[in-house]
Image: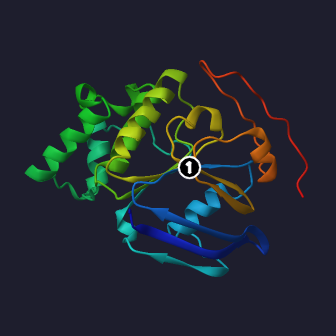
Amino acid sequence: MDHTLIQVHNVDAAYQGKVVLNNVSMSIREHDFIGIIGPNGGGKTTLLKVLMGLMKHSAGNIEYTIDRSEIGYLPQGNMVDEKFPITVKEVVASGLGKGLHIRKKPDAGQLQQLDAVLKKVGLYSLAARPIGELSGGELQRTLLARTIVSLPRLLILDEPDTHVDNRFELELYSLLKELNKTMTILLVSHDIGIISPYIKSIACVNRDLHYHDSNEISEELLKVYNCPIEMITHGTVPHRVMKSHNHS
């Protein structure tokens, strides 16, 4: 059985006295691929910050069997200055821990690892391209490569499909499914219909947390979980949209 990397026990978190997470408990096990869903303002990003130690929780406790340096994090949104004169390979290399400001080049082992990651994400042929010349999907792939080049045991992604086209979105999730063979993944998404074929389980966060040990979830189950999100499916699956419902 895969062992537990992080165990969350009855955790509360608040901003300026307002409770955002209430009595949250969950286990994150090795090789999990958990889709985190919920409404805007429901606490999804707060949960990620608490897990990574970027925000203190006000009650409960969290147990770790991994070091926080073994967690890779791709935040929501693009914080890169696309006008900065830097190449794809240089951006990805910065994830190895050798900052560009100290002008140290990766060693032979790191260069091999860097090339392997560039090939894995389909960027090897674009390694010398300036980031200002990339498409939205190529830039997001570059940022993902920077996040995984250090080979984290836990990969946390906050809506990585924001501002990318549908083609790259599907390529991204296929890549994440492949990465899941060697790393645990937590993925925040607004669209359960898109991610459900790729993830293994679902956590609905709307102040409380409800865990569903399957990638199949119905509109009725979302209502039980008090998770008022839109459920849209694509492809051969019938298109469904879930209406909002009142919080209890």
Q: For the residue carrying disc 1, how many other residues have a C-alpha within 10 Å: few (<14), some (14-19), or many (20+)?
A: some
Considering only vertical position in the picture, is 203 above or below 215? below
Which residue appears at 29% of the width and 51% of the height?
94
Q: Position of residue 107 (x, y in %)?
A: 11, 53
Coordinates of residue 179 in the picture (x, y in percent): 35, 44
Q: Nearer the viewer, residue 28 or 160?
A: 28
Residue, disc 1: 201
Q: Residue 148, image x and y in percent?
A: 34, 49
- The answer to which of 114 and 82 lies nearer the viewer is 114
Q: Most extreme residue toward the left, as rendered?
A: 108
Residue at the far front: name it. Answer: 1
What residue is rendered at 46% in x and 43% in y?
Answer: 80
Residue type (three-letter) at the residue carrying disc 1: Ser
Left-right relation of 118 to 81 = left
For the point 77% across and 39% down, which residue is it?
219
**Residue drawn 26% across and 47% down?**
93
Say which element carries label 1: strand
Quadrant in which the N terminus is drawn: bottom left
Q: Is residue 53 above or below residue 122?
A: below
Vertical placement of residue 68 versus 222, above or below: below
